[in-house]
Amino acid sequence: MGFFNRIWNNKSSAVVFPTETALPSAVIRAPRTVIVLGGGGARGAAHLGVMRRIKESDLDISRLVGVSMGAFVGAMCAVDGDVESIQKRSIELIRSPSFLSKQKLLGCTDRDTRGQEKTGFFSWYQRLTRYLAAHQRCNRAVMGRSILTNTFLRQAIDSLVPDIQIDETATPLSIIAADLRTGKPIVLESGSLRTAVEASMAIPGIFQPVEHQGMLLCDIGTIHSLPIEFAKHYPHDLSIGVDVSQNLNVIADCSTALDVMIRMEEIGERMHRRASLHEADLIIRPHVHGIAWFDFHRVEALVDAGYQAANITLSGFSRRENGMQSSSAQSTKSLQ
């Protein structure tokens, strides 16, 4: 079908991969590293800091695997190894008037700079406009496939991702999505890079699912934000998962049906993610708690959080590796 279609096996609940991805018997160069970039909306900006720190290390990035925002950042980094340039262009887009205006659709610009609701006439006006907007979006949610169109997504993707095929990227790339028709996870490794990123970022109900070669694709990150299990099917010496998810807070109540559905989705995602963490050799978890998926206002802080978390994790890993090598050398010397 022109792309790498993984099929969910109902008997073993595993994804089928070709046999040529068997691991090698020996390490012959710098650690070949598969990096899985998880979903998390705006929190995914932390991936840029993580990737910048990894680029400074001696790790050989053999493949990037991305879901949702991780697919977006992964696509940019797979095309261009200059992460600082990617970071600069990304921040310029986020700070642009066009992008800021689009954020209003996601509900993140209704507050002033102090985080307080406006008062007086503006408070009344906001309540009225919110009511009208909510009514319109409710109609879209009931009668259409999504609350928002994908124009916002496409404009952002087209601004930062070139119009090339996935298998043309400098670093091998796998993009994870879900096929609504078959109910199976899909891994895209060829075909349009932009289309694959859009499909992986199409949050169910918020953005429209993407028609692609007979499939109806959307973001699988809402239920599986860190699909680390995909990494182990590629040749590698080290697998790293980058987790930019939220902590699950205790709440007082679920007062509406929508609250109940969203809460159960959060619980299911957390359970799925925690069950997957042991699949990676290393987990990098930037401190991004408290940042909503649509809040891009603190993008620089998110990038820095990613860099700092990667620095701590990789430094600790390097010390352990050096300690193991030192112990091995001493053992060899004592035997001689």
Image (tube, rainbow, N blue to C red):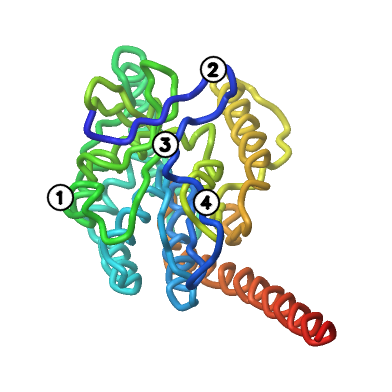
Residue type at numbered disc 2: Asn
* Residue hosting label 4: 23
Could you say whether the residue bearing mark 4 is in a helix, strand or loop? loop
* Residue hosting label 1: 163
Q: Marks 1 and 3, Cα distance to the nearest angstrom?
A: 28 Å
Residue type at numbered disc 3: Pro
Q: Marks 1 and 4, Cα distance to the nearest angstrom?
A: 32 Å
> Residues at badges 4 and 3 in contact (C-beta under 8 Å)?
no
Q: Nearer the viewer, residue 61 or 155?
A: 61
Mark 4 or mark 3, earlier in chain: 3
Residue type at numbered disc 1: Asp
Q: Marks 4 and 3, Cα distance to the nearest angstrom?
A: 12 Å
Residue type at numbered disc 4: Leu
Q: Marks 4 and 2, Cα distance to the nearest angstrom?
A: 25 Å
Q: Nearer the viewer, residue 121 or 10?
A: 10
Could you say whether the residue bearing mark 3 is in a helix, strand or loop? loop
